[in-house]
Amino acid sequence: MYRTGLALTTMLVLTLACGGERASDGSPGEEPAAASPEAPEADGDVIEVRLITDEQGNRFEPAQIEAEQGDIIRLVLVSGVHNLNFLPDSNPGATGLPPATDMLQLPGQTLDVPVTMKPGHYYFQCDPHALLGMVGHLEVED
Ligand SMILES: [Cu+2]
């Protein structure tokens, strides 16, 4: 779905879907985002993490995060193409790790990742740029 060869029109459709806007035909193709009663935003903090590519390289900002279970890590794409992966191999013994996210590739695009892990120290990375140093750590506190 996120191939680089996708036409701009397809990306535009994704943008509109993410922004909650609708085409003029009133197509009801999207689910309401906030209607679910178990939405974790209700009692957790939202922690913004920006995903950046610029002349200084590729990075998370901030790359060191503190959170509590039930908080939300909100990825905000500034530039480049990135994802977030709590790589299981680099978090030995961890349970409740969220799955690797899809790639974010539209500036301004956001993606919420719930903090589902037990208190502890967790490693995360951007898969395309881990070897270039785009890694970080999450401390889940009691
Ligand atoms: Cu990246």
Image (spheres, rainbow, N blue to C red):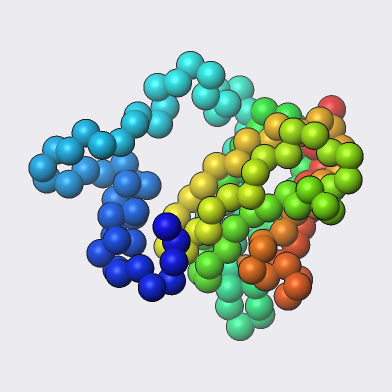
Image height of 54 relative to 94, above or below? below
Q: Quadrant of ligand 1?
A: bottom right
Q: Residue at x 89, y 39 (%)?
A: 93
Image height of 128 relative to 61, above or below? below
Image height of 18 relative to 38, above or below? below
Direction from residue 49 to residue 132 in the image, left or right: right
Image quadrant occupied by the C terminus: top right
Image quarter for residue 24? top left
Direction from residue 95 to residue 14 in the image, left or right: left
**Image spot of residue 7 (x, y percent):** 30, 69
Q: Nearer the viewer, residue 94 or 137?
A: 94
Count of marks, rendered view: 0
Q: Residue at x 25, y 64 (%)?
A: 9
Direction from residue 47 to residue 107 in the image, left or right: left
| Residue 141 seen in the figure | no
**Image spot of residue 68 (x, y percent):** 75, 32
Image quadrant occupied by the N terminus: bottom left
Q: Residue at x 73, y 39 (%)?
A: 97
Image quarter for residue 74? top right
| Residue 52 seen in the figure | yes
**Image spot of residue 44 (x, y percent):** 63, 28
Image quarter for residue 134? bottom right
Q: Residue at x 77, y 43 (%)?
A: 66
Image height of 136 relative to 46, above or below? below
